[in-house]
């Protein structure tokens, strides 16, 4: 588990490279800024060297671009990935001032927000992703803004993780424990796999 930027989030990541491949095409980004944090999980199309090259370029773009509206981040990545096979990705930005999370998904990187308060209905919210490929076919989309409370937990998972993991999410464990368990139990092992888990804890006084 890692703690960032005055305890805005605690996070953990677990990943698996497809057997026979040297490098994974699944990558993640965790980046802080004043009063917030950006998280992304992305998957280069296919697997192997070309998938990893596309994913690595997307990581560099997200790490170097200024934090802008999330739609602008996607458009920036799209322009810089045109010479690659492209990626699918989901991005979430926590804002500790407004206590909101803004997220967008393009392609099949799953996103779920699990509420810390078991009395909140619904207990979890899923990201609505649009079909497309960043670097090839960017869809029309808009960012969704979700209010968050301290203890809410975000899960981002590439398609190497079976989607049934969303039916068995637990509140008790830390982010790294959750990521490790999901990878161990739900990795399909027919593709690269990555799961990124982040718990919103807000800013310390």
Image (tube, rainbow, N blue to C red):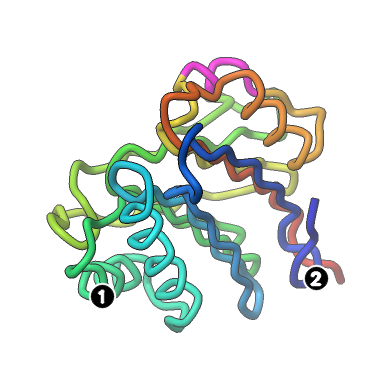
Disc on res. 6: 2
- Residue 15 falls in which quadrant of the image? top right
Residue 44 is at least partly visible in this image: yes
Q: Residues within 10 Å of mark 1 (few under 14, many from 20)?
A: some
| Percent of width and height locating residue 129 | 30, 41
Residue 72 part of the magenta segment: no
SS assignment at label 2: loop
Q: Label 1 belongs to which residue?
A: 80
Magenta part of the chain: 164-169
Residue 155 is at least partly visible in this image: no
**Circle 1/circle 2 CB separation < 8 Å:** no
| Percent of width and height locating residue 168 | 61, 16
The residue positioned 76% from the left and 41% from the top of the image is 176
- Vertical placement of residue 85 versus 97, above or below: above
Q: Residues within 10 Å of mark 2 (few under 14, many from 20)?
A: some
SS assignment at label 1: helix
The residue positioned 28% from the left and 46% from the top of the image is 45
* Residue in front for this viewpoint, 35 or 39: 39
Residue 165 part of the magenta segment: yes
Quadrant location of the C terminus in the rendered image = bottom right
Work out whether mark 1 precedes mark 2 in sequence or the reverse, and give the earlier one. Answer: 2
User: How far separated are the C-alphas under marks 1 and 2?
Assistant: 32 Å
């Amino acid at each position: 588990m890692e703690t960032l930027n005055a305890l805005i989030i605690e996070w953990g990541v677990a990943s698996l490279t497809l057997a026979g491949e040297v490098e994974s095409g699944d990558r993640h980004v965790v980046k802080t800024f004043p009063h917030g944090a950006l998280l992304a999980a992305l998957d280069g199309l296919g697997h192997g060297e070309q998938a990893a090259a596309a994913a690595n370029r997307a990581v560099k773009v997200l790490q170097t671009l200024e934090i802008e509206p999330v739609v602008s981040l996607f458009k920036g990545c799209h322009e810089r990935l045109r010479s690659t096979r492209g990626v699918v990705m989901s991005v979430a930005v926590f804002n500790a001032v407004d206590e909101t999370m803004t997220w967008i998904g393009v392609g099949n990187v799953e996103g779920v927000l699990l509420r810390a308060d078991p009395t909140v209905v619904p207990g979890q919210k899923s990201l609505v992703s649009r079909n497309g490929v960043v670097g090839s076919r960017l869809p029309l989309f808009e960012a969704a803004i979700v209010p968050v409370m301290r203890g809410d937990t975000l899960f981002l998972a590439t398609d190497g993780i079976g989607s049934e993991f969303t039916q068995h999410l637990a509140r008790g464990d830390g982010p790294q424990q959750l990521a490790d368990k999901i990878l161990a139990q739900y990795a399909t092992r027919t593709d690269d796999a990555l799961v990124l888990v982040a718990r919103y804890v807000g800013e310390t006084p």
